[in-house]
Amino acid sequence: MGALIVNPVKQGAEDVVELYRRHCAEQGTDPLVLETSVEDPGGGMARRALQAGVDSVVVAGGDGTVRAVAGEFAGTGVPLGVVPLGTGNLLARNLGVPVDAPAKAFAVATSRGERRIDVAWAAMDDGDELAFVVMAGMGLDATVMANTNDNLKAKAGWLAYVVSAGQNIIGDSYRMRVEVDGRVAMDRRQRGVMVGNCGRIQGNVEVFPGAKPDDGVLDVLAVAPRGVVGWYRVATTLLSRFRRHSPPELGHFTGTSVRIEASRPHDIQIDGDHLGQGKVISIRVDKGALSVRVP
């Protein structure tokens, strides 16, 4: 028995529901369709699916929906299939799942190919842990996520993030202390710190070269540019496919646990979901916790 967890407001959602119902008819099984809501982006639906005893689940939606469902299925051994319907679709991109062809993605999501990937857990200001599978951040990237126009995102896709970045790139640096595996990796004024479970973001930009979602390691990137020249060096480094060295504006570290503490509250995001502002975010990795359907 399987289930479909779908964000009904996403373009293409109705088509995926039809694909799923047709698939169930072919398999001789009863369809279980669970729709997310503004109040519950997927966690409650995932728990209902598990309580129903599903042996697989397909999640159709954006990164936020995938993140919410993945957190509930982590550690269960029940495989998760992803049909990307959002703007970023970052987990799908990093796993090679088609992002512009829902029917092909659905075929992958209901196939037998599986890959166990890591799940990261983040707590803001010593609050409850929340799961993410792609990337978390404190500072500029979280501010960009918080201020991206939803209407523009629906029309222009990931380019809406570029617009938001341009509007927020000028701003104050915060002093941030970065600890990796319990040791101080960096303590300086910075625009932001990103922690990745995967390496690739929108526009096929590889923020963390060589990062893999199943290596049991978190990648950390601290960004501290000064002036136009500093931003130029950061941009050219991140956009380069042949990154031989990093400029002083970037600090790159790896480990299994990360703690970031800012001198004052700053924007925090996980997998594109803005959590608000906080001074501390603590992150750990749970190796191989989630089974995902892949090509």
Image (cartoon, rainbow, N blue to C red):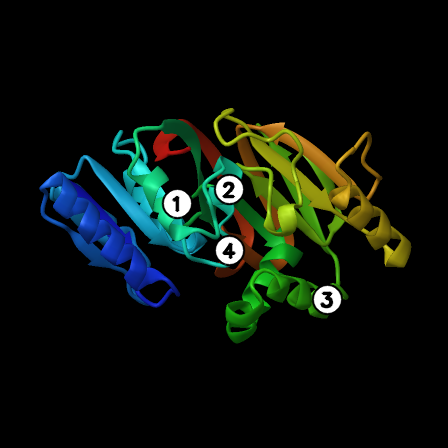
In the rendered structure, are the residues bearing label 4 and label 1 in contact, judged by CB atoms less than 8 Å apart? Answer: no
Looking at the picture, tell me which residue is in the foreground, 82 or 250: 82
**Residue 129 percent location from the top left of the image:** 39, 45
- Under circle 2, the secondary element is strand
The residue type indicated by label 2 comes to: Ser
Q: Please give the residue where the numbered disc 1 appears in the rendered image.
A: 104
Would you place residue 197 above or below residue 265 in this image? above
**Pointer 4 or 1: first along the chain:** 1
**Residue 52 percent location from the top left of the image:** 11, 44
**Pointer 3 or 2: first along the chain:** 3
- How far is mark 1 from mark 3, CA to CA? 34 Å
Q: Residue at x 50, y 69 (%)?
A: 154
**Pointer 2 or 4: first along the chain:** 4
- How far is mark 4 from mark 3, CA to CA? 17 Å
Number of the front mark, 1 or 2? 1
Q: Residue at x 54, y 55 (%)?
A: 268
Q: Please give the residue where the numbered disc 4 appears in the rendered image.
A: 272
Label 2 crowd bin: few (<14), some (14–19), many (20+), radius 10 Å: some
